[in-house]
Image (tube, coloured by chain):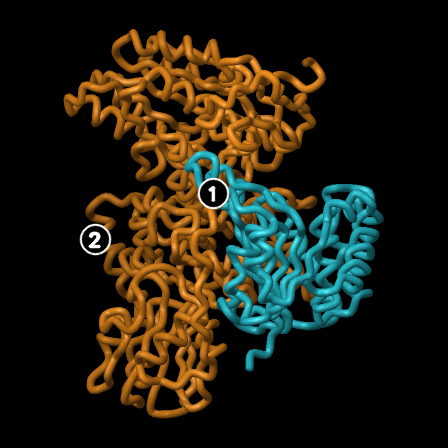
Chain colours: A orange, B cyan
């Protein structure tokens, strides 16, 4: 139809339209979020879609749609699949009647993640097919065809792009958007959909029985392919397959693995023809283990021999270095380029005017000896302000906090959690903390949106994914119905009241909740809210540094003296911090 | 030899590196050429150091290897220093005469680098230094600095100027097309007329 310059995730979203999807759900998570974000702003939408409250919820909704015979997509990041793992594992047994594609985006180097886990392990664990594109074009093509594969084998198909697929751009050859849609119809069949022991034992056999034909089909479809050129070979998957094609000599054989499970006979035939095989893949040694399993006399090099790194993401230079270590010629020699040392770091930072900054500032002021479990979101950057002591996964701020409290640790525990994360998996932890008598403060950082992943709406925003008004919910009412008797809502831009609220919380016992509520400064600006900037009176600034510890990017220093830059969003909190009254609204002084 | 012309655009989250790279990608589509690029999304965008890799005529991966970039475009002096190792010795740098001191400097009491010392540390490269803010103001909006920078670098980019200008028109918000087209022209004239330092 047309060649367009697209982000990997945009190509994937377009492929869904070409494949006539009927249903899409997901929970935002970098690098997967833009797929649903593109689908939800389509002008003509012939499918149902939602941002769900967490990945398990998203998966089960999409599974149900596929049980009704629809084509359904469910998206998440790799760690989201941990949340959805419970239904995932058994969905392989029940199978699907429509087509179900589960996109789980991996993040080598953990650019924006808490770990470097490999979705392909889940596919192996669940015995589900997994597609692993090596380029943006291949991601588009594979996803377009993945629904038919799912329907052919009546199995959910796992689709796992990595960051360098999702967030790479390229010229993508697109097809026509489809116009055919299915009508949902659920056909009662307890033997398939009710996994009591008697049924599930049978379903397990059916799942295992599908495997041989599935492996053959993935070779037939051209996802696993090879070129024989010499007595040495490289086997590569994902982005590593793209990099190796940039640097591989013309006399080295190449096999590209784009789908799992790998047909052992096909792989053995390839491996057996070579004296030496180097396996190149990011994250876990999934392909390497498969090669080792089939190799009889061939020397196999990879992560397990120390030839290829286990951690991080690859570049063409990583691949060239591995080839060199393996004694395989590469066509490129990369220079040893060393970054300049001592350049001051510029890590991501909470925005000027972000509501999280005064909240963390006040927590630190009031709970000087406190312990601060936190969670996943922009506010993890509160680490820079000394107000984040733990972060492990979505929702764990409250549970880790109650665990610390109930361990007998006597210092005050103050957990911080965003509104979307609270609704994702925070609520059961709060209920548990109350039920079991924890002594802690929970601070819900309520900025009305899922900010870090690109400002997706959640039930607290009042809008659905497609922009319709949703039923209002009350975080206060949720907390109260979990049994919390002391719940206070406060504007974090009002520092004196914020400090006073935390002081009150400190004096009480049991589970206390403070809801710090103020829209995300980015969405506020986009919706037209303008606040006057603040300025420093140089005559009155004593250079005491009180505002320095606030850590706002709009405050700069000339020597010891503070000045406010054009980044100022006008929250005005620094004016309350300044002990000499040197900061005021522009034009007022 | 690699077949692609590799450009690294660096700056601070919010300065518009992604839009600048979109213009280059769109220009490749107009000229019917292949292109690969890689961007920073997610948490790193919150005021952190960001990079966009663009490989004109690229066919495989989207990442540029340090030491092999054909052109470095930096929206901030400090970011030019941070990424200069992507260029080979004597490589081409087009940099904005603009320095945002990272908040980390104040928080950790690090030395504040100044413009002269940074430019001195870059002087072994082929440097064109541009006052993008002035030209952007002249074009009609301070927000068009990214397109000014692209214009200033355009004489070193193997894409036709008319294609690049058409790509600018296609990529920027409708209301800002004329401002950005002017920004591109002003940048291009300045880039062509500024002797290397």
Instruction: Say whether marks 2 and 1 touch (CB < 8 Å).
Output: no
Q: Position of residue A434 (x, y in %)?
A: 26, 17
- Residue picked out by circle 1: B111
Quadrant of image for the N terminus of chain A: bottom right
Image quarter of residue B27: bottom right
Q: Position of residue A325 (x, y in %)?
A: 31, 79
Residue A102 seen in the current view: no
Front residue of B75/A341: it is A341
Q: Secondary structure at mark 1?
A: loop
Q: Which mark identifies residue A239?
A: none
Front residue of A553/A144: it is A553
Q: Please tell me which residue is depicted at 32% across the width and 84% down the height of the picture.
A: A327
Q: Position of residue B54 (x, y in %)?
A: 60, 64
Q: Please tell me which residue is depicted at 40% across the width and 16% down the height of the picture.
A: A514
Q: Are marks 2 and 1 on the same chain?
A: no
Q: What is the chain identity of the residue bearing mark 1?
A: B
Q: Position of residue A202 (x, y in %)?
A: 23, 55
Q: What is the chain identity of the residue bearing mark 2?
A: A
Q: Residue furthest left?
A: A408
Label 1 crowd bin: few (<14), some (14–19), many (20+), radius 10 Å = few
- Residue picked out by circle 2: A201
Q: Distance between the Cα atoms at labels 2 and 1?
A: 67 Å
Q: Secondary structure at mark 2?
A: helix
Q: Please tell me which residue is depicted at 30% across the width and 66% down the height of the picture.
A: A286
């Amino acid at each position: 139809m047309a060649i367009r310059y697209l982000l990997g995730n945009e190509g994937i979203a377009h492929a869904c339209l070409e494949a006539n999807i009927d249903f899409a759900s997901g929970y935002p998570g970098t690098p997967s979020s833009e797929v649903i974000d593109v689908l939800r702003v389509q002008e003509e939408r012939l499918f149902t879609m939602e941002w769900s409250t967490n990945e398990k919820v998203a998966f089960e909704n999409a599974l149900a749609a596929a049980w009704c015979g629809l084509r359904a997509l469910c998206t998440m990041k790799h760690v989201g699949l941990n949340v959805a793992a419970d239904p995932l594992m058994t969905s392989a047994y029940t199978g699907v009647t429509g087509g179900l594609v589960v996109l789980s985006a991996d993040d080598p180097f953990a650019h924006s993640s808490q770990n470097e886990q490999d979705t392909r392990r889940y596919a192996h664990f669940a015995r589900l097919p997994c597609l692993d594109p090596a380029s943006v074009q291949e991601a588009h093509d594979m996803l377009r065809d993945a629904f038919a594969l799912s329907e052919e084998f009546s199995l959910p198909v796992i689709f796992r792009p990595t960051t360098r697929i999702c967030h790479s751009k390229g010229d993508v050859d697109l097809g026509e958007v489809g116009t055919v849609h299915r009508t949902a119809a659920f056909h009662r069949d307890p033997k398939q959909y009710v996994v009591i022991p008697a049924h599930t034992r049978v379903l397990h056999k059916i799942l295992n029985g599908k495997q041989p034909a599935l492996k053959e089909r993935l070779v037939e479809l051209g996802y696993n392919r090879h070129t024989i050129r010499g007595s040495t070979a490289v086997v590569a998957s994902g982005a590593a397959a793209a990099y190796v094609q940039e640097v591989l000599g013309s006399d080295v054989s190449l096999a590209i693995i784009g789908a799992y499970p790998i047909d052992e006979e096909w792989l053995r035939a390839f491996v057996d023809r070579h004296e030496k095989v180097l396996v190149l893949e990011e994250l876990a040694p999934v392909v390497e283990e498969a090669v080792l399993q089939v190799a009889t006399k061939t020397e196999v090099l990879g992560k397990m021999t120390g030839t290829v790194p286990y951690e991080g993401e690859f570049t063409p230079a990583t691949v060239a270095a591995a080839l060199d270590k393996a004694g395989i010629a590469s066509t490129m020699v990369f220079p040893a380029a060393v970054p300049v040392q001592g350049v001051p770091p510029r890590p991501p930072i909470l925005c000027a005017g972000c509501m999280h900054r005064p909240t963390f500032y006040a927590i630190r002021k009031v709970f000087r000896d406190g312990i601060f479990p936190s969670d996943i979101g922009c506010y993890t950057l509160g680490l820079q302000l000394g107000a984040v002591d733990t972060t492990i996964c979505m929702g764990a701020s409250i549970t880790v906090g109650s665990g610390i409290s109930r361990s007998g640790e006597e210092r005050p525990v103050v957990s911080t959690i965003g509104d979307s994360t609270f609704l994702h998996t925070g609520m059961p932890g709060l209920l548990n903390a109350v039920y079991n008598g924890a002594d802690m403060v929970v601070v819900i950082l309520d900025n009305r949106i899922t900010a870090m992943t690109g400002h997706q709406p959640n039930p607290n925003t009042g809008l659905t994914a497609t922009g319709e008004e949703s039923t209002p919910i009350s975080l206060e009412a949720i907390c109260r119905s979990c049994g919390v008797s002391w719940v206070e809502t406060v504007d974090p831009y009002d520092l004196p009241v914020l400090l006073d609220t935390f002081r009150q919380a400190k004096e009480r016992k049991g589970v206390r909740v403070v809801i710090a509520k103020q829209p995300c400064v980015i969405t506020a600006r986009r919706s037209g809210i303008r606040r006057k900037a603040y300025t420093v009176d140089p005559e009155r600034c004593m250079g005491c540094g009180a505002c320095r510890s606030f850590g706002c990017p709009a405050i700069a220093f000339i020597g010891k003296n503070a000045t406010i830059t054009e980044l100022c969003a006008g929250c005005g909190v620094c004016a309350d911090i300044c002990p000499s009254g040197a900061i005021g609204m522009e034009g007022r002084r | 030899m690699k077949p692609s012309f590799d450009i690294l655009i660096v700056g601070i989250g919010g300065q518009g590196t992604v839009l600048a790279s979109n213009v280059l990608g769109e220009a490749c589509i107009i000229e019917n050429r292949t292109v690969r690029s890689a961007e920073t999304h997610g948490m790193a965008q919150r005021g952190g150091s960001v990079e966009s890799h663009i490989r004109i005529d690229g066919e495989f991966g989207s990442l540029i290897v340090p030491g092999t970039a054909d052109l470095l475009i930096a929206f901030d002096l400090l970011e030019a220093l941070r990424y200069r190792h992507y260029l080979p010795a004597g490589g081409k740098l087009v940099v904005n005469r603009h320095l945002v001191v990272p908040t980390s400097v104040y928080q950790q009491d690090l030395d504040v680098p100044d413009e002269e010392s940074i430019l001195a540390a870059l002087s072994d490269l082929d440097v064109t230094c541009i006052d993008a803010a002035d030209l952007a103001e002249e074009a009609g909006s301070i927000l068009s600095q990214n397109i000014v920078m692209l214009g200033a670098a355009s004489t070193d980019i193997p894409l036709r100027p008319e294609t690049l200008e058409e790509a600018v028109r296609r990529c920027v918000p409708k209301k800002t097309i004329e401002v950005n087209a002017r920004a591109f022209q002003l940048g291009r004239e300045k880039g062509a007329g500024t002797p290397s330092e």
